[in-house]
Amino acid sequence: MTDNEVSRASETRKYATGDENLQNVFDSVTQLCSNLFQAEISLLSFIEDDIQIVKGAAGLAATTISRTDSFCSHTILSSEVMVVLDATKDVRFRGNRFVTAAPFIRFYAGAPLRTALGFNIGALCIADPRPRRDFSATNRSQLGQMARLISSRMDDLIVGQCNLVAPRHSVDLEGMISSYGKRPVSAAIQNISIRGAMINVAGALIPRGEEVVLSIGTVAIVATAMWTRNGLIGLSFDRPINDEDLASVHNSVRKAPATLPSMRGSSQIASEQ
């Protein structure tokens, strides 16, 4: 499991529901990988909570794999290409059912699919029943570049969908923002939608990819900083807020004193009416 598993899994589900237009691309890329690296198998997969969902495949029927049996679930733990030259000699995989039984994987190389927010949501990988002595730095670079190209195309698609279904509206609101373990500070909300907001926080440095809590009146929302510039911060909500909460924000807390309500348990959105 990754250190940011809850947010990573949420991000993966967002991409997994918006990838239909990329199916031909996924299939073409996996076939290209098999040809380029002379591997019998190539997969493009998303790693959800407890499963690996194969989105594109060459040399193996697309399927769903338990995360406990997944090589790619190890790949997403790093930003680097993961290489296993002989799985029978690797303590992590020598007892894996895909090593001890068909397709009898020996060689594996995988590159993480990393989103614009810095979450590794899956992997582009190649595998072979024959072990290898080496997988060169050039090969690693090529596989990594192909994964980055796919990630960039997915980002373009998802951002386009969000802009289409969740238009932002200019607002005149004030709230509070807090990173975990840091003191809450005032935030001027410049626009907001069900999926995100842009805010101005004087003197606050919030790195891209950091999780924060944005509170507006009695509504508290977990979000991720997408980018910062001159005090302006773009936030992507970890889960879309519902219409009722958005209406409450617009209608009842314009220029209202901001408070930071407590979060209940592991809930990502708390609303008190």
Image (tube, rainbow, N blue to C red):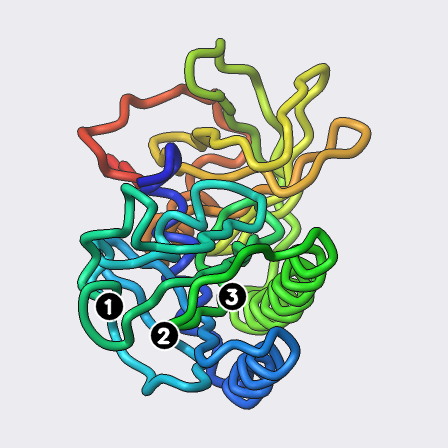
Query: Looking at the image, which residue is at 33% across and 67% down?
Result: 105
The first of marks 3 and 1 along the sequence is: 1
Circle on res. 124: 3
Query: Looking at the image, which residue is at 63% across and 47% down?
Result: 191
Distance from label 3 to label 2 (Cα)? 10 Å
Q: Which residue is mark 1?
A: 65
Residue 30 image-quadrant placement: bottom right
The first of marks 1 and 2 along the sequence is: 2
Within-10-Å neighbours for mark 3: few <14, some 14–19, many 20+: many
Distance from label 3 to label 1 (Cα)? 15 Å
Question: Under tag 1, what secondary structure?
Answer: strand
Question: Under tag 2, what secondary structure?
Answer: strand
* Amino acid type, label 3: Leu
* Amino acid type, label 2: Val
Residue 71 shown left or right of residue 15 in the figure:
left
* Amino acid type, label 1: Ile
Task: Name the one closer to the observer, 135 or 220.
Answer: 135
Circle on res. 270: none
Task: Point out residue 35 in the picture as x, y percentages from the top left corner.
Answer: 61, 83
Task: Point out residue 83 in the picture as x, y percentages from the top left corner.
Answer: 50, 52
Within-10-Å neighbours for mark 1: few <14, some 14–19, many 20+: some
* The furthest residue to the front: 133
Distance from label 1 to label 2 (Cα)? 8 Å
Task: Name the one closer to the observer, 119 or 174.
Answer: 119
Q: Is residue 252 above or below residue 167?
A: above
Q: Which residue is mark 2?
A: 54
